[in-house]
Image (cartoon, rainbow, N blue to C red):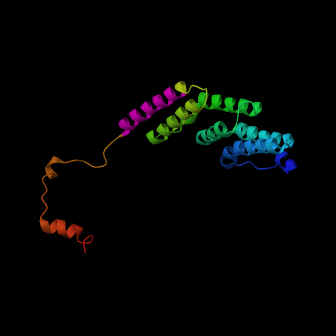
Amino acid sequence: MLDLLETRSLAIISHIDGPLLPEVYSEIKAIEKEVNLNLTSLSDAVEKMMVRVIEEGLPLDELVLVIENVNEFLVEGDTRRFFEAMDEAIAIELAATPQIISEMDSHEELDEHIDYLKVIGRLTSHDPGDAIDSVQRHMEEVGSSDNADYSPLYENSSAQGDDKFTDADVKSLFSGLVS
């Protein structure tokens, strides 16, 4: 099993493995202490997998899940290499925010991105303020371009606005819906 964990041919599925590996690492360490067994090789292999998941990159929502599980299951002294890789990934994510959001064109996506940045700020020592500011600037750009591109699909003619419908017209219109 150790050989399998240490091989680079083992496929890592970041959205599954990323959030689970901190708990696996923690369980190995707990078993090691409880049974007084030396599982250093196994914990080192899992740590390398955790570092690999981070270095290969995670979308922001998956990175948040990993951070939450790291905070729940790991102590920083446990795995220095992993915490360094995670800190670097967070710093890169925050610095790359303008490029990441450049393709986003809906307020819903941008609001969600801001929410994830706030969670990262709350869970880590990183300040997402500049990244949040860049998302908000992009939201303003998207909002102003949406308003400039808006054109109604119909012409409102005030001359036709006085149409009167009889009860028979309304009944005929909705007769298929009412049995």
Q: Residue at x 79, y 45 (%)?
A: 31
Q: Position of residue 38 (x, y in %)?
A: 87, 41
Horizontal side, residue 171 vs residue 145: left or right: left
Is 138 a magenta residue?
yes
Magenta residues, start to end: 131-149
Horizontal side, residue 19 vs residue 106: left or right: right
Residue 65 vertical position relative to residue 170 in the rendered view, above or below: above
Q: Position of residue 123 (x, y in %)?
A: 59, 32
Image quarter of residue 66: top right
Horizontal side, residue 153 vs residue 69: left or right: left
Is 144 a magenta residue?
yes
Q: Residue at x 12, y 58 (%)?
A: 164
Choose between 159 and 93: the one closer to the eye.
Answer: 93
Residue found farthest to the bottom? 179
Residue 104 vertical position relative to residue 13 in the rendered view, above or below: above
Q: State whether the magenta stretch is mostly helix, strand or loop.
A: helix
Q: Position of residue 11 (x, y in %)?
A: 76, 50
Q: Residue at x 72, y 29 (%)?
A: 84
Choose between 86 and 108: the one closer to the eye.
Answer: 86
- Rendered-image quadrant of the C terminus: bottom left
Choose between 46 and 71: the one closer to the eye.
Answer: 71
| Residue 98 visible | no
Residue 167 vertical position relative to residue 64 in the rendered view, above or below: below
> Total label count?
0
Q: Position of residue 159 (x, y in %)?
A: 14, 49
Horizontal side, residue 118 vs residue 62: left or right: left
Choose between 55 and 76: the one closer to the eye.
Answer: 76
